[in-house]
Image: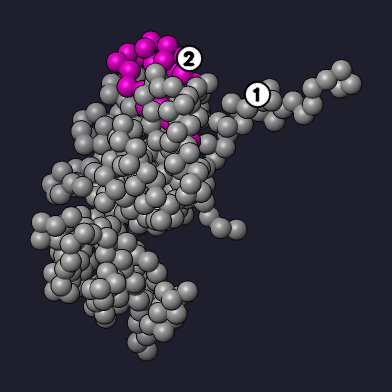
Amino acid sequence: MKKVYADLHLCPNLRDLQQVSRMVIKASRLGYHLLAIPFPPNCMREEIERIRGICNEVSIDLASRVDLRPRTSDELIRNVRKLRRKFEIVAVLCESKNVARQAAKDRRVDLLNFPSRNYRLRFFDMAEAELAAGSLAALEIDMEPLVALESPARTRVLSSLRKETAVAQGYHVPVVLSSGVSDELLLRKPMELAALSSLFDLRRDLALSAVSQTPVAIVKRNREKLDSRFVAPGIRVVRRGKDC
Amino acid sequence: MLKRLKRRYLAIEIDSAESFDSRELMEAVWCAIEKLYGEYGASHTGLSLIEHEADRRRVVLRVLCDAVDTVRAALASITKINGKSVALHVLMVSGTLKALYRKLEN
């Protein structure tokens, strides 16, 4: 069966529809079938549908995503409660340890993202991994700094990513490789992202799964949950009516 | 007995509004490999230029089979050549040049 490749963090400027269109076409040409674009929390459904229309033109599946950047764990809980049913993917950009820990244990959070360029704010350690392993959160790694940065900054990023992926593998926390780019020239093919991940010693099978099966499974799981017929995992309404 | 070295041919697309000559391209590729893997790592790639079709914005490289991912990662890390923005994408990998060209035409 043909592999479906996904990029869950494409960051075009949503105000510039031409750029969105260019990036979506480029992603399609590079072999992606599923994209997730972060929308602002207060965006209208029409805006999402407009971008979905652009994606449908090139046969790309779009998943709506929201990036939360809370300052406290209470703010995170409030935002997740408000937005979970509005977006297909909820990602949390963890800029403090408290937020990171709360995000890791919250089953409504899909992706844990850490500031890519500031290695002091990367809180993915063993305690974080243990919490994430007990919930549904995956570690998202943006590959943009590996492409855009030069040494020694890239060396530092590689060093922290090597530690984090080793911890994630040890605790069986799923890893998702995303591009995280807002410039189409920085977009790379899924196989190229997988090859780049060898720089921080991610196993090849895990790297391939991080650009295909894992992100696709996250979107599938959430779509199932957001469906009106969903009751609980494994239970869904098949038919409604008096004769049931 | 010495093991036969297996090679792979990589067809690469040059994604840029600018044009580059073969020398500029190869220098950028070698430089990217050396930056990521050092001279020792670069020496294991067996990299050489087979063909550069400037009009079709395509390059064919030959590398050792074990170094395909190394070269792929290095190519992905190239964002500029002589200050001009560029992206290099691997279009196809093949064991023989004949098969590579056949796949490219399909």
User: The N terminus of chain B appears in which quarter of the rendering?
Assistant: bottom left
> Please, what is the three-letter code of the amino acid marked with disc 1?
Ser
Question: Residue A81 bears which disc, if any?
Answer: 2
Look at the picture and state if A102 lies above or below B51.
above
- Given residues A218 and A128, the one toward you in this image is A218
Asked whether the viewer can see residue A243, the reply is: yes
- Given residues A46 and B101, the one toward you in this image is A46
The secondary structure type at the circle numbered 1 is: loop
Look at the picture and state if A105 lies above or below A157.
above
Magenta-drawn stretch contains A173: no
Mark 2 chain: A
The quarter of the displayed image where residue B67 is located: bottom left
> Callout 2 environment at 10 Å: few (<14), some (14 to 19), or many (20+)?
few
The secondary structure type at the circle numbered 2 is: helix
* Residue A132 percent location from the top left of the image: 45, 29
* Residue B38 percent location from the top left of the image: 17, 63
Residue identified by numbered label 1 = A228
Tell me how far mark 1 sits from mark 2, CA to CA.
18 Å
Instruction: Please identify the residue farthest to the right as the structure is shown.
Output: A243
Mark 1 chain: A
Q: Which residue occupies 53% across, 21% down? A: A85
Magenta-drawn stretch contains A81: yes
Look at the picture and state if B52 lies above or below A37.
below
Q: Which residue occupies 34% across, 47% down? A: A22
Left or right of residue A244, residue A73 in this image: left
- The magenta segment is A62-84
* Residue B58 percent location from the top left of the image: 29, 71
